[in-house]
Image (cartoon, grey):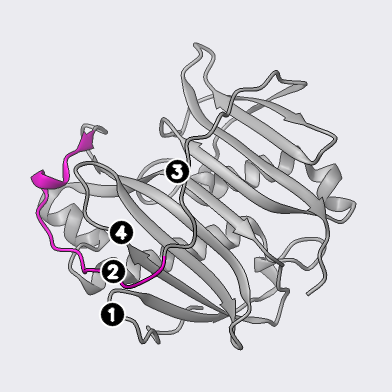
Amino acid sequence: MLEKNISKLEGMYTGKMKLVAHDVDYNNKWKISSFLSNIQEVAGFNCNDYGCGWSVLKDKYNVCFVLTRMKVKFHFYPGSGDKVELSTWPGPKPRLVFPRYFTAKTEDGNQIAEAVSQWVLMDMTARTVKKPADCPFETPDTSHIPVPFEIERADFNFEADNKVERNPTYSDLDYNGHVNNARYAEWIMDLFADKLLQGMETAEIDIKYEQEIRFGNKVLLDYKYNEDGSFFVKGYSEDNKVYFRAKGIFREGVNK
């Protein structure tokens, strides 16, 4: 459970939480899906602070924020019972894509992870992207907060070694009517369960969300693991419409 904002920086929201059993995996390490779910929650609190929370956007403009890119770098993984602080802040308001930044730290300031993300506004009925100018709201000036890292153009192309099929279920869906962002990470990690069960962990993951996945969509998952620890995944439909692409790096487990 995230506590209220404790940030001392204008424009930033910081929530405190204690990890519990369902936040961690077989190796008692913070699950990526839990990390993504909780940073999305602090992002929602931050948006509420300056008047563009989910309910406001839905009621005033019939839009919601949807994620188009998320890149995370993990330095180490806390376990159940550990306390963490999650911080988030927006970048400058753009013409189309909204940048948003995140950090996760221990109570004594050790960096756990950092993330850079990109979002757009989606019309909840037409399921099309809306321009920020069509939904006017003010965002704070956060130029005084250092950006964790720059998100770069990335090559997600690869030749698959394996393919599986996945069908969205009730538990995959969120209140925006599509598969939740964090569930993509669970789908990806499930593909490499043998590596994770052997004690490996994700050093970095980069997910590019191209089309929303909705209930009833059959998703084909191509994937590949390389001996250097890098991995690639592509989710797509039977008619080759790409839902998402992902890449990342596994490493040997790092002790806290």
Give the mark nearest the N terminus, 1 or 4: 1
Lateral position of residue 87 relative to residue 219, left or right: left
Give the residue type that dot 1 points to. Glu
Residue bearing mark 3: 69
Marking on residue 142? 2
Lateral position of residue 182 relative to residue 196, left or right: left
Q: CA distance from mark 4 to mark 2?
A: 7 Å
Q: CA distance from mark 2 to mark 3?
A: 20 Å
Density class for disc 3 (Cα within 10 Å; few <14, some 14-19, many ≥20) is: many
Q: Nearer the viewer, residue 201 or 155?
A: 155
Question: Tag 4, which secondary structure?
Answer: loop
Question: Tag 3, which secondary structure?
Answer: strand
Residue, far top: 239
Q: Please identify, in this view, whether the residue under mark 1 or under mark 3 is nearer the observer.
A: 1
Q: CA distance from mark 1 to mark 2?
A: 7 Å
Residue bearing mark 4: 91
Q: Is residue 82 above or below residue 57?
A: below
Q: Residue at x 61, y 73 (%)?
A: 111
Density class for disc 1 (Cα within 10 Å; few <14, some 14-19, many ≥20) is: few
Give the residue type that dot 4 points to. Gly
Q: Say if the magenta span includes residue 88.
A: no
Q: CA distance from mark 4 to mark 3?
A: 14 Å
